[in-house]
Amino acid sequence: MANLKEIRTRITSVNSTMQITSAMKMVSAAKLKRAQDSITQMRPYAEKLQQMMGNLTETMLEMENPYATERPINKVLIIAINSNRGLCGGFNANIIKQVTRLSQNDLAGKEVTIYPIGKKAADSFKRDDRLYSGDVLMNHEKACTIFDDMNYQMASDIFQPVMDEYAIGSYDEVIVIYNQFKNAATQIVTTESLLPVKADESAVSSSENSDYIFQPGKEELLEVLIPNALKTAFYKGLKDSLASEHGARMTAMHKATDNASDLLGDLKLTYNKARQAAITTEILEIVGGAEALNG
């Protein structure tokens, strides 16, 4: 059994750790509330934008838009959205695993390039020869710090070069992988193909399409709508990831605090037993010494 000094040192250490994890849990809970409100408010807009795209499906199938042009998929860009910090459970590891699984299985035999968003993703892939090295790399510092002060303009600045390179044929498909926020305890690893923009062919014959009058014409509207919808989808992925990060960290810190509390209770029990044993030993030694003197 460890001596009393060692147990007291461990109790002090665990107690300090529990205070830190508890504080981090409260900070993450406050940040989660803001991030959750933000993504909740944005989703109706993003969904309505996709609905408008659905009502323009027939025109999208007929028009020649650089972002809607499908070609044989040989070169794929994977955008992996992670966080800048750790201590959030499997949040970051799950994205890395999904990128690896996708590139080795579904995209096996294709030329895969990885563009990491967030410092954790950048650190994981920094030695990977598939790391993106085009114009976006110049914006990589911004991509790694975007979560510090995220806004639509920053997301647009990061994603615009990706759209430009797809338009000139540098890539045949652009996939984004991120954690979709469901609740504080649940984050869903989501894989979305953003480019090329695929028309919802099931909506072509929908009677809803005939209920709208478009001004200006559908093609002119799509020229503006498609880039906006792409940037909005990317921005929504960033917001989902940010809310998921805070939820994952809050849950991880809650579990860490509970575990520290349980460990602290065990250590105190062990300390009390060791102290009682030491006191008992001292009493026995005193009694034994007294009897020896009397004898």
Image (cartoon, helix red, strand yellow):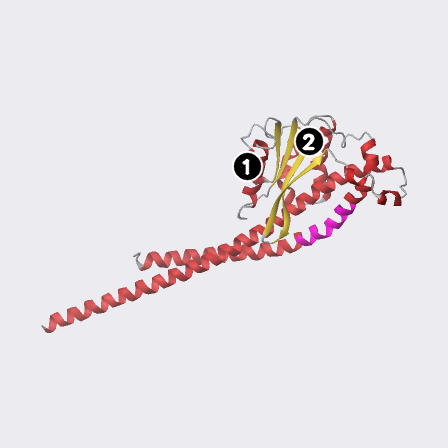
130 shown above or below 41: above
Q: Find residue 37 and report its horizontal and vertical position in percent.
A: 69, 54
Q: Is residue 116 magenta?
A: no
For the residue labelled by badge 2, is the local secondary structure a helix, a strand or a loop? strand
N-term-proximal mark, 1 vs 2? 1
Q: Find residue 242 and report its horizontal and vertical position in percent.
A: 63, 47
Instruction: Locate residue 7: give its quadrant.
Output: bottom left
From the image, tell me which residue sits under label 1: 123
Distance between mark 1 and mark 2 Cα atoms: 24 Å
Q: Find residue 265 and report its horizontal and vertical position in percent.
A: 41, 62
Q: Quadrant of the N terminus?
A: bottom left
Q: What's the magenta region?
A: 36-49
Does 62 sit left or right of 148 as displayed? right
Mark 1 vs mark 2: in front: 2
Front residue of 260/60: it is 60
Q: Find residue 16 and report its horizontal and vertical position in percent.
A: 46, 57
